[in-house]
Image: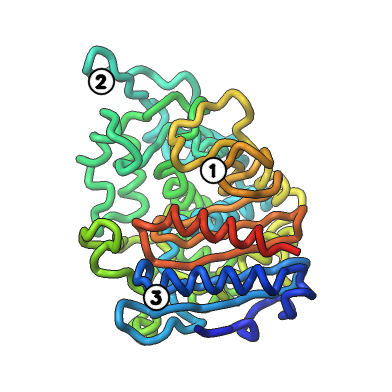
Amino acid sequence: MNDHRASSSAFAVAEPEEAGLSAAGLARLTAVMQRQVDARHVPGVSMLIARGGKVGYRRDLGALRADGPPLPGDTIFRIYSMTKPIVSVALMMLVEEGRLFISDPLAKFVPEFANAKVGVEKDGKLELVAAERPITVQDLLRHTSGLTYAFTGVSAVQRLYAKARLGAPDLTNAQLVAALAKLPLIDQPGTSWDYGHSTDVVGRIIEIVSGQSLGAFLQERILTPLGMSDTAFFVPPDKQDRVAKPFAKDPDTGESVTLTETNFESGGGGLWSTMDDYERFVQMLYLGGALGNTRLLGRKTLEFMTADHLGPHVRIGTAFLLAPGHGFGLGFAVRREVGLAPTPGTPGEFFWGGIAGTAFWIAPKEELIAMMMIQAPGQRDYYRQLFRSLVHAALA
């Protein structure tokens, strides 16, 4: 077990009680997660909790990979969809510069979407009908565009997605978005929350508006200013020995585990990062858009992003990814209710995670930040619920 509370955190490091945390509760969290590691249910777990601007808990348990060295504090994790909040912030930076509006139609930037069609299943056949209104940038940010993922369901539209080679390693962002424009939408724009390739399209809009590749824009405008030196779309050879890997076989099913690799700068899920790097991004969000002397977003813009943008009239299509009591903002899930959800929480908190098991949330009313990094795709839901429950039990 490694205690890295004195690592490169951008927040002050404090004893648990000084940070509003229960030492006994944190000891229980550590013990539970250590038992999971010892039982070989997960290779390693990295965790961080901060309250009131003070990091009161930071632990790295287990190994970098099966039978590998201990999990170091600077482990590089595949964060997958935790890329989405970073890319959403990047887009809103361009909005703050007056270079686009979130009300702009997607077709303004990608004309191929001007005549989008919606796939409707009737009597076992897929019919294509015209979109009732244009897809907007806001739809992309809140996942109401009608774009989907092949792996989130088995509808006729999603089967077409599976056949379209959208995950082909040689695709560019421009090619991916052009391929998406040829496919039908899973629902009418603005009517249903369907998790999918929307943020990949956001990444392409950033490229079009900025004139830079997505990677170059993120590096110049977010990663370098925040000091996120280990966050990138590709891991260089000299850092490969720090990459965390899942078990080769799923400990629950015995099936082979393979983490999908992307060879392009996927705005929806392409980044690698470390706990300390992503903490800097999360702290920027917690502090209202600035970290130290670096301001990325205005306070009101961030408040707007972390408000619920679904309301009561948007259907939740990908229901297994958005628990009851939650809505979605511009790049983040947002908690609406204390109850209804399967784990404790606070209205107004916002969060997201990645398919390999990484996760974070920020609860402004509790002055709370919590982060967990694992590489265990089959166990991600279990560990997210476990971590949330144990963290809330440790709040003083």
Q: Which residue is mark 3?
A: 38
Q: Residues within 10 Å of mark 2 (few under 14, many from 20)?
A: some
Q: Which residue is mark 1?
A: 141
Instruction: Give the mark nearest the N terminus, 1 or 2.
Output: 2
First in sequence, mark 3 or 1: give its number.
3
Amino acid type, mark 2 = Leu
Which residue sits at x=75%, y=56%? 366
Q: Quadrant of residue 242?
A: bottom left
**Residue 66's spot in the image, x, y percent?**
30, 77
Q: Position of residue 46 (x, y in %)?
A: 50, 73
Image quadrant assignment for residue 269: bottom left
Spatial separation of the CA atoms under disc 2 and disc 3: 50 Å
**Image quadrant where one finds the C terminus:** bottom right
Label 3 sits on what residue type? Asp
Asked if one can make out residue 211 in the rendered structure from this viewpoint, the answer is no
Mark 3, other Cα within 10 Å: few <14 / some 14–19 / many ≥20: some
The residue singled out by tag 2 in the image is: 126
What distance separates the C-alpha of mark 3 from that of mark 1? 40 Å
Three-letter code for the amino acid on which mark 1 is drawn: Leu
Residues at marks 1 and 2, CA–CA distance in whole angstroms:
27 Å
Say above or below: 394 vs 16.
above
Q: What secondary structure is marked by label 2?
A: strand
Q: Earlier in the sequence, mark 2 or mark 3?
A: 3
> Residue sitting at 49 percent across and 34 percent down?
193
